[in-house]
Image (tube, rainbow, N blue to C red):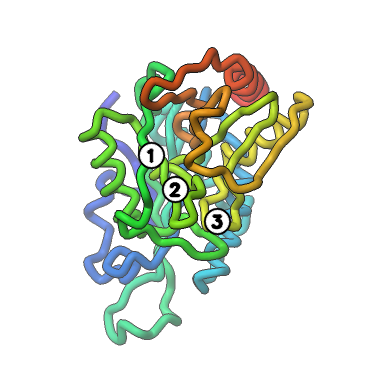
Amino acid sequence: MSSKKTYYINGEWVSNIDEKISHEDGGFQRGYGLFETIRFEKKKIFRPEKHFERLSLGLSNIKIPLDYNYSKILSLLNEIINKNDIADGLIRLTITMGDINNDPWDFSNKKNVYISIRKLPTKIKSPVKIKFYAENNFPIVRFLPQVKSLNYLGNMLAKRQAEDDGAFEPVFYNSNNYITECAVRNIFFIKDNILLTPNKKLGILPGIMRKTVLETAKNLGFNISTNNIKYDDVNEMDEAFITSTAVGVLPCFWGKWKSNYSISLKIKNTIQIKFFN
């Protein structure tokens, strides 16, 4: 089978996404839009209803109307999987403010919808190394409620810095010395059988896998805390892991800190069995 992929753009299926992305797209020019990265395994989509829920709320917050209902979105997601014959992969659904052919400040124009697909990345050997950074050193955008916007400049700069420092992922702490999140993932800690993760009120992205971990840990009988976590206290933690739709639950470490990750792996395996097996 050809390696050429099929993508969805504004009601059309095209073989090259660059052919159809207009240079007049105000969303890409100004970072005015949202996206969702959606995982599927064995052609089964991971929690599509939760992705649609977050997408709808985010678009409402940034005043972009959504004409597609859940059934339409789900149909398109399944169709792009089948058109590309990919069993395990990631779908990126992007919605922007639309074209700016005439008045760039006329927000009544029709939005643009792009759906692309790729295979799942190679499985990552864990645990992975993380490195903590003061988020004030990067142009990180924090506001409430947080949305999955197209502006990831600060996050990507921190990601590159972490890689230069030999780490897989950066983890931020704010001006109050509170842990917030990673560049593209959420962070969890475990202390005395209590699952801890930063509160959404800090302006972090409410990840779909984050929500899944919280639900799973609760069902397994663990206590959960979303109180502020001080950067100075991380070395006192028993376990730690990062999460995203793409990597799932990924145990992590920093410096000379070590763990056996027993609870982390129990949560990871429970999610894998429930949603992907």
Residue at 48% of width from left, 39% of height from top?
232
C-alpha span from label 3 to label 2: 10 Å
Residue at 33% of width from left, 73% of height from top?
99
Tell me, yes or no, whether the two marked residues, 2 and 1, touch with CB atoms within 8 Å. yes
The mark closer to the camera, 3 or 2, is: 2
Residue ID for mark 2? 173
Residue ID for mark 1? 132
Give whichever of discs 3 and 2 has the lower sequence position: 2
**Residue 247 against residue 145 in the figure, above or below:** above
Question: In the rendered structure, which amino acid carries the disc numbered 3?
Answer: Leu
Residue 213 on image: x %, y %: 63, 33
Q: What element carries label 2?
A: strand
**Residue 203 against residue 209 in the figure, above or below:** below
Tell me, yes or no, whether the two marked residues, 3 and 1, touch with CB atoms within 8 Å. no
**Residue 137 against residue 238 in the figure, above or below:** below
Q: Quadrant of the N terminus?
A: top left
Question: In the rendered structure, which amino acid carries the disc numbered 2?
Answer: Tyr
Residue 243 visible in the shown view: yes
Give whichever of discs 3 and 1 has the lower sequence position: 1
